[in-house]
Amino acid sequence: MKKVYINSISSITPQKTFDNSEFLDEVIIHEEPVVFAVNPNYKEYIPPAAARRMAKGIKMGVVASKTALNEARLNNVDAIITGTGMGCLRDSEKFLSGLIDNNEQFLTPTSFIQSTHNTVGGQIALELQCKGYNFTYVHGSNSFESALLDAKLQLELDEARNILIGGVDELGDHTTKLHELIHHIKKEKASTKTLLDSKTKGTMFGEGAIFFVLSNIKQESSYAEVTSVSMFNTLPQNDVSKTALNILNENNLTIKDIDAIVLGNNGDVEFDGYYNVLTSEIFSNTQQICYKHLIGEFNTASPFGMWIASKILKTQKLPDVLKLNETGVSSFKNILLYNQYRGENHSFTLLKTC
Amino acid sequence: MTKGVAITGMGIISAIGNNVAENFQSLVKGKKGISRISKIDTIHKDEIMVGEIDYTNSELEQILKLSPDNNYSRTGLLGAIAAKEAVVNSGIKDINAYKTGLISATSVGGMDMTEKFYYDYFKSDTYLKYIEAHNAGDSTQKIADQLGINKSLVTTISTACSSAANAIMLGARLIKSGKLDRVIVGGTDCMSKFTINGFKTLMILSDTYNTPFDENRKGLNLGEAAAFLVLESDAVIKAKNKTVLGYVKGYGNANDAFHQTASSDHGDGATLAMEKALKVAGLDNKDIDYINAHGTATGNNDLSEGRAIIRVFGENTPEFSSTKAYTGHTLAAAGAIEAVYSVLALQNNVIYPNLNFKTQMKEFNITPQLVLKEKELQTVMSNSFGFGGNCSTVIFSKEP
């Protein structure tokens, strides 16, 4: 079986993460429970006429995919695999509110066409003229990990050489209001500085597009090797540590080999317990890293964890703003990532230096 | 690596039957499930025809013995019914005895509830429970729960009308690579105002019975359905001495990269998908005994698909037919519905008629199979194409 490398990374989030020469050099402190992605200059990548028709999620996805290809020095890929939890929300809301408000009359097809979950994957294929394998996964907080697992399988078996994978989700006004209604979004003010210790229900919502080129050929631009990806639709809190240990064991690693653990804590007092069992027990002496206080929670926020781990493994640097504890660790070889949302769709991913 | 990917169970609910046996009876009797719409109040009700499932949501909830506070969308309800039939049909007693996953497909997810309560959510607390059921993955989580699949690999694919074919493909790859011993694969989509109006704006809905591959075809009928198949590895088949219904022999996925909704004139993506599937199966085009075509009865699809079939098979194509005239186009579920029909064709050595056909298309000379035909079948090819340029082909066979 071939090894699988991350050959490029690209990220558009509510932080200034688009320029890969930086690594959270300047941090935006958010003070609201809903935070929006920082727009790159889309015009540099998409003709203005086309950009006008595209909702934010599509633009973010298309641009992040282009920069990922650039960094990997590729003109095309063998496959495009996308993940999105909620799909193209803005177009869905636009079409649905138009339908209801005007009693099914005066509708135009554009927002319907762009509302399908695979719009971003299809648009990227169109832009690249890529006729290869094209999948879109839509499984909550495991949407991106499904894409990662699929790509890893193909690259290991040498069915493809270069695969573009990514996660993209956009905020939609109406859906945001609905999630406020059921307190999945915090009722009170949320802040980047205090989110992770907030001890209240709900979280900060965000959006973004995070893309990678995975390959079974290592090159100069390579960031890390993906050694393991596992997904679980359910996982009782009591089983989280045991499951993490099993995964380490399967990969011939021990707790001591893990230089950092990247966690999906989002400050929701009802569900951060899943992470706390790891940080208070088996990984209490390990460097703990969190990121959702910077970019908010969304179904495809977890690839930003992989973006961070890739950066750390390549640069051997860890920005203070990501640290949950202080261990003084300065060299990074193996990083474990763990994520879940509202107690469902758990994932463990292992990366190592290459 | 396991050689064959065996199909050991099937379940289905569609406009032509609430289980596998009823669907097969309708297929061989030429009984359509297309009618005027009754369950959704739409201003288009006199201009469209659909493939609806008889059961109401509360009837489906009763069959599944759900508590009144459940928050299943109709997509989840239909999926759970079909997936449970598949597992029973496979004779599985302990679902967790082997590493078992679930790969489902949907395009509408919980949109049926969202469109009902979109503004009402702000007025009353009664239906707030459905907000969490909107996302596509939720229906799959519900199906996993119904099947007792825990702590496992569960995911959802949404590639428009090719979704369920892709779910079958991924499941087969996970079995072949040894990641899973057993996987339940399929798709589910319920009817919604959202999709009715979406396809209406695209002007591809027929105001009468859809007529696949007919010169005067006027567009598609939307349908709702769910179907699932149980795939198992050689090791499980051997250990449990299981009856095999058929095999997933080959699969191919390609992108047309032509237009967000339309297929290319000559079916580039479709051609690639069929060619890839033949290659994975290790078969020549002459080895295919029957093609269950995508055949949506839109002007664009049937021309593009027909040309692609000729590109792959020449003018001497095997018998082909579309079963969309029976069920309507069931969107993300279509690939799974037609997988069940393909396996039934293999088991019973029959080719289903392409209903409602009157006039030969002028662009080519190939004609679909028009009457029920008995023929010894070894292999069936099934096509599914969708928005976003997604093209998928799966080949089913009697032998591994």
Image (cartoon, coloured by chain):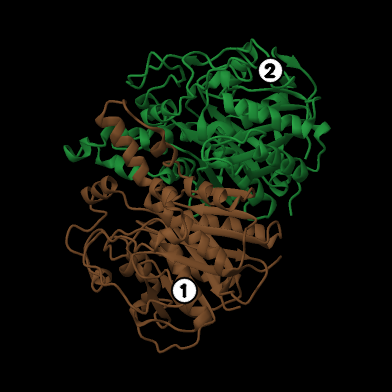
In what element is the residue under mark 2? loop
Residue type indicated by callout 1: Asn
> Which residue carries the number 2 mark?
B362
**Colour for chain A in the figure:** brown
Q: How many labels does the image show?
A: 2
Where disc 1 sits, the SS reads loop
Picture disc at residue A20: 1
Quarter of the N terminus of chain A within the rendering? bottom right
Q: Can residue B75 be seen in this view?
A: yes
The 10 Å Cα crowd at callout 1, few under 14, some 14 to 19, many 20 or more, is: some
How far from the left and from the top, in percent, is residue B348?
72, 22
Letter of the chain that mark 1 sits on in the rendering: A
Colour of chain B in the rendered structure image: green
Report which quarter residue A103 is drawn in: top left
On screen, residue A53 above or below A200 = above
Q: How crowded is mark 2: few (under 14 residues within 10 Å), some or many (20 or more)?
A: few
Query: Who is closer to the viewer here, A128 or A269?
Result: A128
Q: Residue at x 51, y 71 (%)?
A: A245
| Kind of residue indicated by mark 2 | Lys
In front: mark 2 or mark 1?
2
Instruction: Classify residue A50 as left or right of residue B68.
Output: right
Q: How far apart are the alpha carbons under marks 2 and 1?
A: 55 Å
Q: Where's the C terminus of chain A, which quadrant? A: bottom right
- Residue at mark 2: chain: B
Q: Where is residue A299 in the image (x, y as percent from the top left)?
A: 40, 55
